[in-house]
Image (tube, rainbow, N blue to C red):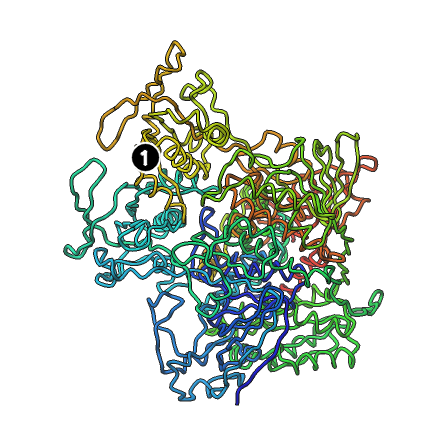
Amino acid sequence: MAEQAHKTGTSSWEPRIVAFLCRWCSYAGADLAGVSRISYPPTTRVILVPCSSRISPYHILKALIEGADGVLVSGCHPGDCHYLTGNLLARRRFILLKRLLAYLGIEEARVKFSWISASEGEEFAQLIREVTEEVRAIGPFHGFLREVPGEETHDG
Amino acid sequence: MVRLKRLTVNFLVVGGGISGMQAALDMAEMGLKVVLAEATPSIGGHMAQLDKTFPTNDCSMCILSPKMVACGRDPMIDIRTLTEVLEVKGKPGRYEILLREAPRKVDPRKCLGCGACAKACPTERPGTFDEELVTAKAIDRPFPQAYPNAYAIDETVCIRCGKCVEACPAGAIDLDAEETFLYLKAEGIVWAGGYRLGNIDALTQYGYRQFEDVITSLEMERFLSSSGPTGGKLLVPSTGKEPERIAFLQCVGSRDVRFGRPYCSSVCCTYAIKEALLAKEHCSGTVATRIFYMDIRTQGKGFERYYMRAEREGVEFIRSRVFRVTKGGAQLVLTYSPETGGVREEAFDLVVLSVGMVPQTHSSLETAFPRRGPYGYFRQIPDQILEAQGCVAIGATACPRDIPESVVSAGGAALQVASLARTRESRVVPPPVRWDERNTAGTPPRIGVFVCHCGTNIASVVAVKEVREFAKTLPNVVYAGELLYACSEDSQATIQKMIDKHDLNRVIVASCSPRTHAPLFQETIHQKGLNPALFEMANIRDQCSWVHSDAPREATEKAKELVAMAVAKVRTHRPLIPQTLEVNHKALVIGGGLAGLSAALGIARKGFGVTLVEQADRLGGMAIHHRQFWDGRPVAPFLEALEAAVRGNDLVTVRTATRITDLSGYKGNFEATFHGENGETKGTFGAVIIATGANEWQPKGMYGFGQDERILTQTALSDLIEQSPERLKRLRRIVMIQCVGSRTEERPYCSRVCCTHAIQNALALNQIAPEAQIVIAYRDIRTYGLREDLYRTAREKGILFVRYDPERPPEVAVPEDREITRPIPVRLYDPILETTFEVPAQMVVLAAATVPLETNRELAQMAKVTLDPDGFFLEAHAKLRPVDCAMEGVFLAGTAQGPKDMGETIEQAFAAAARACGILSKQALEGEASVAEVDTSRCAGCGLCELVCPFHAITIDDSKQVSVVNAALCKGCGACVASCRNGALHLPNTDDAQMVDMLKALNG
């Protein structure tokens, strides 16, 4: 796709962010941003999931492999989870993933976890602005393979 | 011409706040048809105005909005907004009611909620939803989540200029729409009028209306709310800056005899704590928050912990009533007298008045509702449950109370009116209609994509035609078309026509949010024989055109990708049929005390069988130790009548001296094993009510308890008063000590009933021995709500109240030789006089804590429910599901759930019974459509999924060493799927492979 072309870091490059939002709180918060006409950058593509606990590290890594520059996972605030404790499970998995990403040398800001409630339209918009800016600052994601100076390069 | 509609329903609910909504929902669950009449343009009531709810700080709108949608969707609930009752005639079982429905002038079926009309409207008026802090237009929607989600014209200010009619893209506005009269025949009426903040204009000393920076608690809620007038920024109105010092003044227009409102409003202490905590959260700098109070009344479940948390987080509590608020420079100056004496002045930036509640009145309804409480309240009395009722007042109309208490009262009322004779006949509700479905298995996907313009809401930003053309290029898409309004009636016909013409077996609608609209389109395709799961939406309005109006090019690209993702996903969707669960139409009630008896009576009167199991060999539980309800009504005759009614009902099986040794199954089908006199027996039940009660703690070692028989608990004193009052006649000095074992580190909760109980006993002693001096040593007197009258009476009778600090509790010196004639010296430190004095008491009465049963843990494990940190049973949600358990089909009644008095116990028992009847009324139940599935060839039986499932829906089959999903319990959250290391678990239609397909589609 055309986007692949401007992934090379030209000035027209815009980050691409995959957002996994839970149905009950965060997706509703994103809808509220719309109902309230609060604009934010058109950088995200939302995937609706029943609960943030549906998301495993696999989905986050897969999103990056498939071409996303950043990934956002958002669930209900602690205590608000429609499935009682799903958001807490998600958080636990996410903390583990964070350490893996750091080990792999992937910038921390590429992957974000947050809580957004159904009444936080403005907060959702602000979150997207922040994530967009942070990912923009790091630049495009070039995959898990990197050139090592002085050695033969892998051909992805 | 007068427009008159005739309707016959089962019940009328007046008032669409949380109480009314809950009553309507509970009745609808029982298969009863309800008209829900609300005077304003939207249901939701006061709860919609609140920012957060105590004690969990849950977002109020987040938890309310699903209830509103549920009311709106329920085919049994007919919501009538802008509607008022004009006249009520008749009697229980047959009422004739005349209602007037004012013209909304906006057709809710056509209104898109786009707001073009309000933008065009030139007329402004005070915005009532925002407590008149901002203006609204004459055509307005009170809040974005309103139901019906449509604008409405305020007739009283509209100048009929017609600008809105021109601006409306959907032709939804008709300025000439007229009022409608409804002539309703109903069997019963539930009145959920709610409350309003009392008018405090006469209390000029607080400077409300005089100073801009003195605001009410509800105004504070709007300032804190992110959808409020300041977008959730807490600013001092006069300066526009963040406040540095905020004062909260309690009991403004409550507990004020001179002002004519002597009662306690019951909720203000905890909401002031909430607002103080939220103010700290909202302000960037440090903000000092001081609460000026008389007694902190955090008597509800979890409230005492909340109070302790506020103290830890720096909220200051000052025990003093503020004399006056004046202006000093830019700030407000409070004059008050601290406990240590003298007069102090202190400056604040913002003053929040915790204004007391008054019940709403409704003159044309009041003839049907006997007024049983003082101060305009329509209190419920326990005797009412002995017979089915035609009219019940609930929520804050009945007495001042908070949200969970209102929800409980709503459930109780629903069952009370629902047990009227005629309604009982049609007691089992048939399942919803399922259309015949086509077999799509094995046929390749044939996808139809419908791209919506939503008038100009989408089309003005997104190039709809381009999206449509792009959709045609996507794999398996055999048709792509545009719709002006996908949700309109004619569009449904178009979608159905295209399904036939192109033999579609998958449908995508690219329009608004699936949260609001998926059920509509799913019904549309279902009518054409397509399983509702063969559907997907692309949200190109709420999450695209509305938020990217400044970037139409990018918005169009985004819309195309969202459609591509939806196509990639729906290709592999498969039909899902929710599991049908048979329902056993009998309930099991565990515990034969007041709660269990009441619940059993409620269920049996609705026409269902009940087995009531009691461990002891008699019924009545703790209630036999109580003489009176708080209002003085005697308990014994009531209890006798209740037990007789239960035992006399053929539908009830009473099993005393019986224990439950096993409980398994799920809603609709529980299996219990009993161990009783006849050995072991089994039974199956559709629903279970836990009503096992609580105990009075025996405070061994505290205040000399156990060392001298003249040191006893309040319950023991109650028994003495009842059985041998002559032994009390010669008493001259009695000391009562409150909070014995409550509000401590070990038990950080308030036992709720002890203050009222102690005062009742003190008043009884005062009658038996008028000469006796009674001293009550307390920390805060918590005679919440209308019980405040008792506290006042006690003070008038000369009963002495001495406050103590937990750091310097009373000291009881038990005399060495136990001569009955020698008094027990009790030393009390008075923090006001700063002196210690000694009372030679002839009796010391301890208000011992209410404690959970030790057997709760065992029962909780059997029933797969949870206990709270204090050992009581935990409800599914502190606010809106106070009698439900996380385990569906199990409900809570009485003190098993937490301390409460007898009236509250009865009400909660009825609420639990109502919820249980909701299940028992169904012929069959439907499970979730998308539930986890196990690929046994991959499962290693490691048990991680069993561990993470919050609903205990997965177990490991020991013989095969693989996990097994109980489809009846699974809610389809997918936590197990994400946890499985082998990829052995799947969630149909939200599966890993489908998410990967979406990611791939996104990147071409």
Is residue B64 visible to us here? yes
Q: Which residue lies furthest to the bottom in this view?
A: B1
Which residue is located at x 36 percent, y 21 percent?
B842
Q: Residue furthest left?
A: B329
Q: Is residue A150 left or right of residue B967?
A: left
Q: Which residue lies furthest to the top in this view?
A: B817
Q: Which residue lies furthest to the front in this view?
A: B726
Which residue is located at x 49 percent, y 76 percent?
B114
Tell me the amino acid under the disc marked 1.
Answer: Ile
On the image, the x and y values in percent for residue B900 come to: 50, 41
The residue carrying pointer 1 sits among few (fewer than 14), some (14 to 19) or many (20 or more) residues within 10 Å by Cα, namely: many
Q: Which chain carries label 1?
A: B
Is B351 rendered above or below residue B872?
Answer: below
Is B398 rendered above or below residue A78?
Answer: below
Q: In this view, does B34 lie to the left or right of B818?
A: right
Q: Is residue B390 left or right of residue B801?
A: right
On the image, the x and y values in percent for residue B606 come to: 68, 55
On the image, the x and y values in percent for residue B598 come to: 61, 46
Is A82 rendered above or below residue B563?
Answer: above
On the image, the x and y values in percent for residue B810 come to: 34, 24
Residue closest to the eye, B542 or B434: B434
Which residue is located at x 38 percent, y 62 percent?
B231
Q: Quadrant of the C terminus of chain B?
A: bottom right
Is residue B984 visible to us here? no
Please identify the quarter of the rendering in which residue B875 is found: top right
Residue closest to the eye, B708 or B460: B708
Image label count: 1
Q: Is mark 1 on a helix, strand or loop?
A: loop
- Identify the residue under disc 1: B799
Is B562 rendered above or below residue B771?
Answer: below
